[in-house]
Image: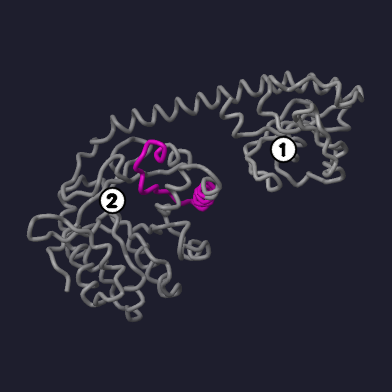
Amino acid sequence: MIDGQPLACFQPFIDTATGLIAGVEALGRLRQPDGSLQSVGPLFLDSRASPTALRRLDRQLREDALQRLHSAPPEWFLSLNISPRWISRLRPGQPLPSLKQLQRYGVEAERIVFEITELGGASQRLAEVVARYRAAGARIAIDDFGAGYSQLDRVLALQPDILKLDMRLFQAAARGGPSGEVVKALAQMAEKTGCWIIAEGVETEAELDFALECGARYVQGYLFAAPRLEFFATDAFVQRFALLRDRYVQSKLAERARLMTLRRSLNQLMARLRIWAESGAPASSLASPVEYPWLLRIYQCDRNGTQISPNLQWGPGGWQEDPSYLGHNWSWRPYFYQLLAEGWEERRLTLSTTYRDATTNQYCLTAGQFIDNGRRLLLVDIDAAGLARD
């Protein structure tokens, strides 16, 4: 038994390029006798709920959203959730109920994004239906990308226009740590396949910053608006978004300034280390790296990437040698072939992007420069976390 009046509430998508509302997602609610609104989400997760009643409820919610879309600005899109569980029940060649609803309410398919949830359905049937949605002019989004059944092979098979990052994964990633790199990699993959990214569940400024870092085209969440029955004005969040975006840009400029300061410090350090390395002096002759608290280790490789010196690390008793990596070849690491590509001709210092060192489990950068007329590479590993604290 489903109690309450089915209604669609709308949560806006903010276009990160303009700050304007670009569209809304229809989210199901049940109005109770006391006027309160309850989410229908738990009903669709309840295995005891009647599938027939749920399909009827789903249809009523979409009908309410489509009827009311005519009062929204004509340039907005409407995102409708579609479950593969319903798709699997369709007969081959059967007219698609969602497309029939669009025709009934006079809504152009170009204004619709069908958001595919729970990618556990039959992939062949799902791909066929998605192709028919797209042929009608609608766009396709995949919800909860990066979690559950959202496998990459399904993404490649369906070729969606939009990927919505899984909210829990996204929020965890915004707090930092390994999940952050995973989500950035997913966002890069989406960009390379021509998909736009939606970051949902944006509730804090830090999460908005991370969404922008990932190149999200749209953001959605309580930082701007909760779902509600009425539509916002298209420019309702332009000023607020502009302030938040400008703050983010300023933080990136400050980050860039820190990087330039690091480069200046590295050039000074490398000049000293080069004299020491080319003279063949012992490690004990090196000064304390007190000016460089982010310094992890110093080592040398030959031009082929094979380590020819022990690691040097500063410790309580001075410089300490670790010979355990002698003979290891690092030519496969991105920073090494970046050095070969960018640093060989000009003998200039090259700095890698941040990476996670599999041996130490630290986030590092590596700076390198050719010495000894190009016969050796002088390399410095940098603690990215220590650099941020500096």
**Which mark, by number, is residue 77?**
2
Q: Residue at x 78, y 44 (%)?
A: 330
Of the pair 123 and 321, the residue shown nearer to us: 321
Q: Position of residue 180 (x, y in %)?
A: 52, 45
Query: Which element is circle 2 on?
Result: strand
Of the pair 324 and 30, the residue shown nearer to us: 324
Q: Is 127 left or right of 287, judged from the image as shown? A: left
Give the residue at mark 1.
338
Query: Which residue is situated farthest in the bottom direction here?
Result: 91
Q: Is 105 left or right of 279, judged from the image as shown? A: left
Q: Quadrant of residue 338?
A: top right
Q: Is residue 138 magenta?
A: no
Q: Is 326 left or right of 223, judged from the image as shown? A: right
Q: Position of residue 178 (x, y in %)?
A: 56, 47
Query: Which element is circle 1 on?
Result: helix
Residue 166 seen anywhere in this rendered image of the structure: yes
Q: Is residue 193 magenta?
A: yes
Tag 1 or tag 2, which sits nearer the N-term? 2
Q: Within 10 angstroms of label 1, few (less than 14), some, or many (20 or more) residues?
A: some
Figure quadrant of the N terminus: bottom left
| Magenta part of the chain | 183-208
Of the pair 125 and 56, the residue shown nearer to us: 56
Q: Residue at x 32, y 33 (%)?
A: 241
The amino acid marked with disc number 2 is Phe
